[in-house]
Structures are given as C-alpha cells and as structure tokens.
Amino acid sequence: MTTYHIELQGDILKVGFGNTQATGDRIVCDVATKLDEMIATGEIPGGSLIKINGRVSVLVSQVLGDKLRKVYDAIAIFDPKIGDKGLDRYVVTISRHPDYRVGDTLDVVRDSQPQANLKVVLCGFANTGKTCFRDGLKQALFQIPNAPESYFISGCPDGDGSWYSETAKRDPDLAAHLKAQYKAGFTKDFAKLKAQEVRSINTPIFVFDVGGKISDENRLIMKEATHAAILVKDETEIELWKVLCDELKLEVIAIVFSDLDGKNDVVESESPILHGRVHRLKRGENVTQRPMVQALARLLVRLSGGETHR
C-alpha cells in the first residue's frame, strides 16, 4: 500500500499520506524513492519555483526539501492558516532565486468552482474524550477513498497537538512529559489568535476541538465554525452546549455520548442528527474503527459534497 502520494499538477506538487499506519522511517524512504524516480524520468522537470500543497510531516518536509532544492531554485509550501476566501497562500522556505526570498508569501487563486468549507467544532465538557475522538476521526477520514481534503487542529492550549496520540501509543510517559511542557494558559490573546487561525483555514473539511468550558474564549473561537458535534457524558450536558451552538448559529450535526467504561459503540440514528454512544475514548488508544467515529467521518464527507461507501 502506498504510504505517501506525490503528483505534479502544473507547478504545484500535490502530496498526502496514504497508509496511515506506516511509521515515519518507512514513509521517508518511500518519499525519497518516489522523488528520485520522478526526477529521473522528467516527471518532475525542475525549474525556478515549485509549490507544495498537502499534508507534510516534519520528517517528510526534510526529504522534500533535500531532493527538490537540487532541481528547483525556490520552494514554497502551502500554509492553510494564512489563506483567504478563494485564495491559497504559499510561504517560500528555500530559495537561491533573486525573485524569491525566504518568508515571501505567494497568493494563488483557487479554482473558481464552488467548494464546500465545513468548519466543525468538537465541543463538550472536560473528560469527554474530545481529543481522542478528534484523532480517530482524522484517521477515519484518511481511510475513505477519494474523501475531500481535511485538516485538524486543537483549539485549546492543553498541549495536545496532533502528535500526542501517536506518541502516547508508543511511549505514554514521554507523551505526558511533552504535553506538560507545551501546555499554555487559555488567555484572551490565545483565543483571538486561534479564532484567526480557524477563520483562515479553507480546506473542504476542517475539524477542531475546544476547551471543556462554556467561556468567552471558547465563544470567540467557536463562532468561526459552521457546524458542531457535541460530546457529553450524560443527558444533562446536552442542552447547555446546544444553547451555545444556537447562540453562535452553528448547526449541530452530532450528539455523541462518551462512555469510558462501555464495551461497544451504538449508532442510534444518523438523521436528522447523528446520535449514539462511543466507548472508551482513552488517550493513546486507536479509535479509528469505532462505529460512531466512522459514522461521523461519513457524514462529514457527505456534507462536503463527497461520496462514501459503507
């Protein structure tokens, strides 16, 4: 199975992960081999500038930069956080070309075809497993053939970056140590910056979670969303978050009961709102195949105009 996809479209190199279970060492070897083949055959011809668009890990970025700088004078990478409506923005990261400097931004008008732009917030009180659910949903979307592009971030300063889940599977103590180091305060300034980030991201499917309180900071971030999925531990929590979503004019697409001690998922209904139970959202566990996670992934694809196959 392909671990990483690479395709040149004009002057844009479209990239993305394939087999999400592959480890970094395997992926970088495959990326290096693929790039060498494409350069040798002229599929990647070289030139003054190449733009890279897609999901790029730190490890993969090192290989891309090393290989492509030998045949291109400048490399620019798509940054979904700083674009605008109908506009993709690339940042020059490598350059020996007089017309491009490192740090320059390049604007590219996106295809004029209308594109769905779902911005879904995962909300709910603390200890409902939002981060674990988010990570499982991310992987579930990757496994749907031809699913629209998706992007996931954390909307709270709790140290749980997208790296956390994978690290916790292999070394829980290291993951906990790094999280404590990265954890920051939930200030008004943080909320403003995070709201700006949410506002700027233009992928067809964008998902983020927020802190487990109904607060002014969360209101500021959540109002940039278009839809919401609510995770709760019991019935009494639902109305509080529904009221907030109504206040912010967010369409609630899912209400998910999180049962830490449960043995299985139950999908109770998928229309008009996805409703059911998800079990054991425990940090470090792979929840990608949980029926409720899969159901929400399919729903996001449908709402974004894509097709799913059960």
Image (cartoon, rainbow, N blue to C red):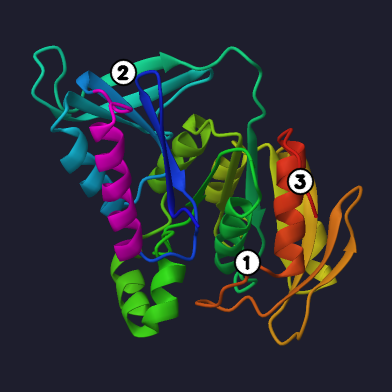
Q: On the rendered image, what quadrant is the C terminus found in? A: bottom right
User: Residue flagged by tag 3: what amino acid is it?
Assistant: Thr
Q: Which of 243 and 254 is in front in this view?
A: 254
Label disc, if present, on residue 288 of the rendered structure: 1
How much space separates mark 3 and mark 1, taking CA atoms?
16 Å
Is 67 displayed left or right of 42 in the figure?
left
Q: Quadrant of residue 287?
A: bottom right
Label disc, if present, on residue 308 of the rendered structure: 3
Task: Give percent across and percent down for residue 301.
Answer: 71, 43
Q: In which quarter of the image is residue 52?
A: top left
User: Residue flagged by tag 1: what amino acid is it?
Assistant: Thr
Other residues around mark 2 within 10 Å, as few (<14) / some (14–19) / many (≥20): some
* Label located before the other in sequence (2 or 3): 2
Tell me the magenta residue range.
24-45
Q: Are marks 2 and 1 in contact (CB under 8 Å)?
A: no
Whether residue 57 appears in this view of the structure is yes
> Which residue has dot 2 on it?
106
